[in-house]
Amino acid sequence: MKISGHYQKPFFWAALLHLLLLALFFLSFHSGEPPGKPVASPPAATAEVPETIKASAVDESQIQQEMDRLKEKELAKQQQQQALVQKRQEEERRLQELQEQKTRLQQEAEQSRAAEAQAAKHLEETKRLQEAAEQQRQAEEKRLAELEAARKAEAEKQRQAEAEAKHQADVKKAADDKKKAEEQQRLAEQAKLQAEAEATNKAQEAARQKAAEDARKKEETAKKSDEARKKTEVEAETKRKAELEAEAKHKVEAAAKKQAAEAEAKRKAEAEAVAKKQAAEAEAKRKAEAEATAKKLAAEEEAQRKAAEAAKRQADRERAVKEQLEAEGKAEAAKQNKAALDQAIARATAAIQQKVLSSWIRPSSAEVGLSCKIAVRLMPGGGVAEAKVVDGECSGDAAFQRSAEMAVLRASPLPIPSEPELQAVFREFEFTFRPR
């Protein structure tokens, strides 16, 4: 049966121990024979027996001590080998963690580059959309300018139409005034003819009256007796005729005036109705066109306002997305920088602790689980200028504290990073020394 290397040495010492025990047993057996048997030996030999037993006892004690020492040495060696194995496993694990960390950092860098590419692409798309929005705004401004020009042209056309309508109204008014003047002239001529007719009637009446007066005078002498009666009758008849003539004249004048007034009123009513109708039609047309133009302009302004609001909302959204992407990029970059800095500090601290631990000489009073917080001040390049245990931050005795401080000094220069910002962090720092 083959014995593994791990158990060869213990087996060897166990076999050696058994052989030594057998030898001691054999020596004890021969030295302890019964005293009844005579032994031919000189007296000097009899005196030497206790010395032999004493020497054998001393040898057994020394052998046991040596065996114990060898066991302790072998145990210490095994513990040292086990510590080395554990240390190697720890190093392998740390190397594996560093490799995984390196892979993770590479992946994060790839993700960061992809995010930057995506952000650049988004910025390019945002710029393109902004340019398109600017072109749309310019086109909208051009269209609005054309609409404003069309509105002004329409207003000018409306003004010309109103001027033409006013001109037509003025022409019609002039015609009406002329017609009115002609009517007034006709009425004046009619009145003149009426006056002439009345004058003729008056002349005829005067002639008739004169003839009657002459006849009366001729008959006066013949009819003096009947003069009073006839005079009264004539006066009465004359008065009656005068009244009838005055009444007839008044009726004629009233009828003429009524006819003229009715004709003037009819003409005015017709002219006013025509003018009102034309004015109402023109006003209705103007209002309808103005309302249509106003509605059209309002619709266009509303469309322009909505388009401007939509463009503004789009620009606001794009600006918000851009700001958010920039903020996220900055936050992610800061986070990555902080994570990288923390990782670098952690790696440097682990390297410092490892080197200090390798330089530590365990004092005899050191126990398992002790720790000390040490304040370290470094010189440029990592040389240790001072290493001192922080008051009240050490669980060991004075010997353990001195051993920890000496371990830091012996580990000088400490493995600090080469980056200036990290060197500034490790210019003065504290770390916990915790030996295994």
Image (cartoon, grey):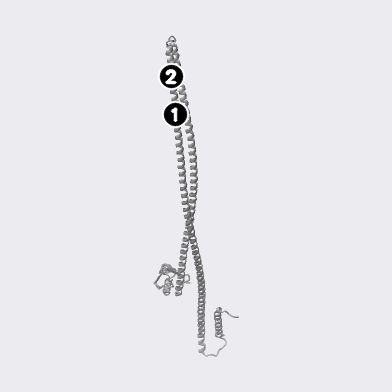
- Is 22 positioned to the left or the right of 406 in the image? right
Which quadrant: the N terminus? bottom right
Position above or below: 219 against 104: above
Pair 1/2: label in front: 2
Residue closer to the observer: 314 or 301: 301
Q: Residue furthest top?
A: 225
The front one of 356 and 311 is 311
Position of residue 184 relative to residue 12, above or below, is above
Q: Which residue is mark 1?
A: 189
- Most extreme residue toward the right is 1
- Could you tell which of marks 1 and 2 lies nearer the N-terminus? 1
Q: Amino acid at mark 1?
A: Glu
Question: Which amino acid type is shown beneath numbered disc 2?
Answer: Ala
Question: What is the CA distance from the residue labelled 1 to the residue labelled 2?
Answer: 26 Å
Percent x, y of residue 430: 42, 68
Task: Identify the image quadrant of residue 387.
Answer: bottom left
Give SS at disc 2: helix
Q: Residue at x 45, y 40 (%)?
A: 167
Residue 123 coordinates in the image, percent (x, y): 48, 61
Q: Helix or strand or loop: what does disc 1 sit on?
A: helix
* Place of residue 409 in the rendered image (x, y in percent of width and height, measured from the top left): 41, 74
- Mark 2 crowdedness (10 Å alpha carbons): few <14, some 14-19, many ≥20: few
- Checking the image for residue 103, the label placed there is none
Q: Residues within 10 Å of mark 1 (few under 14, many from 20)?
A: few
Asked whether the residues under the numbered discs 1 and 2 touch, taking CB atoms below 8 Å apart as contact, a structural biologist would say no
Q: How many marks?
A: 2
| Front residue of 399 and 20 | 399
Which residue is located at x 43 percent, y 27 percent?
Answer: 192
* Residue 181 placement (x, y as % from top left): 44, 33
Return the residue at label 2: 207
